[in-house]
Amino acid sequence: MSGGRFDYDQYKIGYIADRIEQEIERNGREKTREELKEESWRTPDWYEKYPEDKFWYEYPPEVIEKFKIAVQKLREAQIYAHRIDWLLSGDDGEETFLQRLEDELKSQNQPHTYSRDQVHELMCKAFKAGYKKHDVVEAGLEPLETEVECSWILTKFDSTPK
């Protein structure tokens, strides 16, 4: 394993970005059956009394835009922290550090080559072919229930600044 100068905390930056992306994806939408089950502390008649609690909080568009900018900046910060970690740990020299940093920042800002529908179709095929949640988590994602994994992955696709 390489790096370690920062105790691999750069991945926490990615986790924060993931959580913000989750808020973007949830913004104002109705909660799924699985999400409602997670609120098991509520009594059965709760949603009759408080129907607005069937929906995630809805932030105004200007707030969502700031969330998207924050995600982009956090992803960049994670790349910087990771590359500096490898440099300080002796895994990369200065030239390699500069080249890898440039390459990773460029690849993050590459335009998508697939449409949203194509991504959804590919991800559904991957899960049907046997890819498990573990494979998705290893890729840096945090899927929820199997029912919503493909939609969850699309959050990353949809919220990437164009």
Image (cartoon, rainbow, N blue to C red):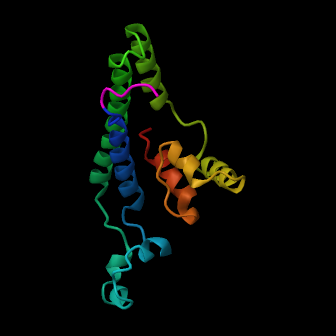
Residue at 52 percent across and 51 percent down: it is 153
Taking the image as shown, residue 109 lies to the left or right of residue 84, namely right
Q: Can you name the residue that lies furthest to the front here?
A: 1
Q: Percent position (x, y) of residue 37?
A: 44, 76
Q: Image height check: is 135 above or below 89?
A: below
Q: Work out which quarter of the rendered image holds the C terminus and state it.
A: top left
Q: Is residue 129 magenta?
A: no
Give coordinates of residue 61: x percent, y percent: 31, 55
The residue lying toward the viewer, choosing from 148 and 132, is 132
Q: Is residue 122 toward the left or the right of residue 143 in the image?
A: right
Place of residue 128 in the rendered image (x, y in percent of width and height, measured from the top left): 70, 56
Q: Is residue 109 visible?
A: no
Residue located 37% across and 72% down the image: 55
17 or 65: nearer the eye? 17
Quarter occupied by residue 9: top left
Residue 144 is at least partly visible in this image: yes
Furthest residue in direction top, as rendered: 95
Q: Is residue 101 above or below residue 44?
A: above
Q: Nearer the viewer, residue 89 or 67?
A: 89
- Residue at 36% x, 17% y is 87
Give the farthest residue toward the right.
129
Quarter of the image holding residue 10? top left
Residue 5: quarter of image: top left
Magenta: main secondary structure equals loop
Q: 85 left or right of 110?
A: left
Write down the region rendered in magenta. Answer: 1-6
Q: Residue at horizontal 42%, vertical 17%?
A: 91
Q: Is residue 98 above or below residue 45?
A: above
